[in-house]
């Protein structure tokens, strides 16, 4: 018997809120693995004891250990189900709030602005559409630091580090939301829903986002989210990425669980249908919609140039832009893609490729308008500032494997079954004037949000379950 019945009982409180769909898939796989292991153990023991004295004490001892491990695994699974069930039964659901007529966003509160002597005024009302696997965590860190520096009001998620992705965004998902409240900064992962976002932010808010070449993005998302996509588990061979791209229609199920990670993920993040082909009229309509809604579209493939354009558009300073690369993978976990494979990835993600090409053109038009030589000088200065901060802040001057990070509070979130994401160690002799800045620049997203007052209990519960699941050997 599967756990479908149990989870169906709990689904009445909105499965997307409670991550029940995720737990159902993993729980079924978990039990299947447990049963399979016990069967294999039973067969192995039968074979062993046909040649041994059945009265030996060792047989009972081995069977006792197996039973003990089985009980531990079942208790772990039952605990997760009970906790999530309790959450669903006690939490106010979004469905109730969605039916309430909410007041439009009130005028923005006045914020401190210490830039009176400058020729332009820094933009303080910001909506960053945080797309997946596009260096967006690094850019988010820049925004969080800027917001704290200017005492801005963040629209933060509640319980999780995203706004209940992959559900569409609703402003009632914001922590401590009340009708009529306005915010300055919105930058966590979401599935974009323009009408709801616009009612949460002031009218003068600057909307911007970031894109990535779909070939590189697909390689990154395939490896990072593979543990969350059951339809990838049956792909044979050592190079599952290559096998999938050679025969995508054989392995891809558009209605499968978390299928959006496997096709046109960027298009999906913006709230559009991800299974559209490149020549579908809906793709062009989506591109035009994004162009109309977002004042600036950056490219992670040219991250430093993107930051300079952002600085120019928002009237920021170079000090606002300094960064360390966050949530980056160890190169040993990155698959090299041949030109043929990159072409296949772009063709498979045709809507994303068309989206990227369009905004690649607008991006370089902005660079030309800014001035190529001026851009080169600014990028050089940004790199110089970053190098200075690396020498001041980072022990050893470079990122390290998760196992080499000495402070557990500085360890980044890892994908299922692998510790592929790098992190940093803070120097122990940082000058006092740089201590706070260094720590904030190196703090991973989960810990930063916690420091801002977000109770990420759902994310941490999932992390505990994920790590426990891996520990028992079923990733």
Image (spheres, helix red, strand yellow):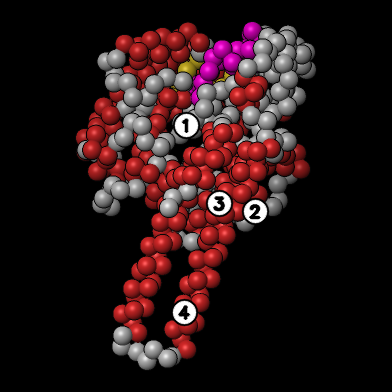
Indicate the position of residue 297 as horizontal and vertical percent values: 47, 18
Q: Is residue 303 magenta?
A: no
* Pointer 4 or 3: first along the chain: 4
Q: Which residue is mark 1?
A: 132
Give the quarter of the image for residue 361.
Answer: top left
Q: Which residue is mark 2?
A: 407
Q: Residues within 10 Å of mark 2 (few under 14, many from 20)?
A: few
Q: Is residue 70 among the parts visible in the rendering?
A: yes
Q: Which residue is mark 4?
A: 62
Give above or below for 415 relative to 382: below
Identity of the residue drawn at 60% across and 24% down: 95
Q: Is residue 396 among the parts visible in the rendering?
A: no
Q: CA distance from mark 4 to mark 1?
A: 46 Å
Q: CA distance from mark 4 to mark 2?
A: 39 Å
Indicate the position of residue 121 as horizontal and vertical percent values: 68, 11
In the image, taking residue 468 as reference, residue 244 lies left or right, namely left
Q: CA distance from mark 3 to mark 2?
A: 22 Å
Give the quarter of the image for residue 176.
Answer: top right
Identity of the residue drawn at 65% across and 49% down: 409
Q: Residues within 10 Å of mark 3 (few under 14, many from 20)?
A: some
């Amino acid at each position: 018997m599967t756990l479908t019945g149990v989870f169906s009982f709990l689904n009445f409180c909105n499965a997307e809120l409670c991550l029940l769909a995720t737990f159902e898939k993993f729980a079924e796989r978990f039990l299947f693995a447990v049963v399979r292991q016990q069967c294999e153990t039973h067969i192995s023991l039968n074979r062993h004891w046909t040649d041994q004295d059945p009265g030996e004490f060792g047989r009972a001892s081995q069977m006792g250990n197996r039973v003990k491990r089985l009980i531990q695994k079942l208790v772990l699974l039952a605990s997760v189900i009970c906790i999530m069930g309790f959450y669903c039964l006690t939490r106010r659901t979004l469905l109730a709030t969605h039916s309430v007529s909410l007041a439009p966003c009130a005028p923005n509160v006045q914020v401190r602005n210490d830039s009176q002597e400058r020729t332009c005024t820094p933009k303080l009302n910001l909506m960053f559409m945080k797309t997946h696997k596009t260096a967006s965590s690094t850019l988010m860190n820049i925004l969080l630091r800027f917001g704290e520096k200017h005492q801005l009001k963040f629209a933060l998620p509640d319980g999780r580090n995203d706004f209940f992705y992959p559900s569409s965004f609703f402003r009632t998902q914001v922590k401590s939301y009340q009708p009529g409240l306005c915010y300055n900064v919105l930058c966590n992962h979401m599935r974009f829903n323009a009408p709801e976002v616009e009612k949460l932010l002031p009218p003068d808010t600057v909307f911007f986002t970031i894109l990535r070449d779909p070939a590189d993005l697909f390689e990154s998302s395939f490896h990072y989210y593979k543990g969350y996509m059951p339809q990838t588990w049956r792909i044979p061979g050592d190079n599952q990425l290559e096998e999938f791209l050679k025969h995508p229609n054989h392995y891809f199920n558009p209605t499968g669980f978390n299928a959006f990670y496997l096709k046109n993920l960027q298009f999906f993040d913006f709230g559009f249908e991800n299974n559209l082909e490149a020549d579908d009229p809906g793709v062009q309509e989506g591109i035009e919609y994004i162009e109309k809604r977002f004042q600036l579209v950056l490219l992670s493939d040219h991250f430093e140039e993107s930051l300079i354009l952002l600085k120019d558009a928002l009237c920021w300073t170079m000090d606002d832009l300094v960064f360390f690369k966050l949530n980056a993978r160890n190169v040993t976990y990155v698959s090299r893609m041949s030109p043929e494979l990159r072409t296949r990835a772009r063709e498979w993600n045709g809507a994303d490729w068309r989206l990227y090409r369009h905004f690649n053109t607008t991006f370089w038009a902005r660079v030309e308008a800014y001035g190529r030589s001026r851009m080169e000088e600014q990028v050089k200065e940004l790199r110089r500032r970053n190098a200075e901060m690396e020498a001041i802040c980072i022990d050893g001057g470079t990122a390290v494997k998760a196992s080499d990070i000495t402070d557990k509070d500085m360890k980044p979130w890892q994908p299922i079954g692998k510790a592929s994401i790098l992190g940093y160690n803070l120097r122990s002799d940082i000058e006092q004037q740089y201590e706070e800045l260094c720590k904030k620049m190196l703090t991973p997203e989960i810990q930063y949000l916690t420091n801002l007052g977000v109770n990420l209990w759902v994310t941490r519960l999932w992390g505990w379950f994920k790590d426990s699941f891996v520990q028992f050997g079923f990733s």
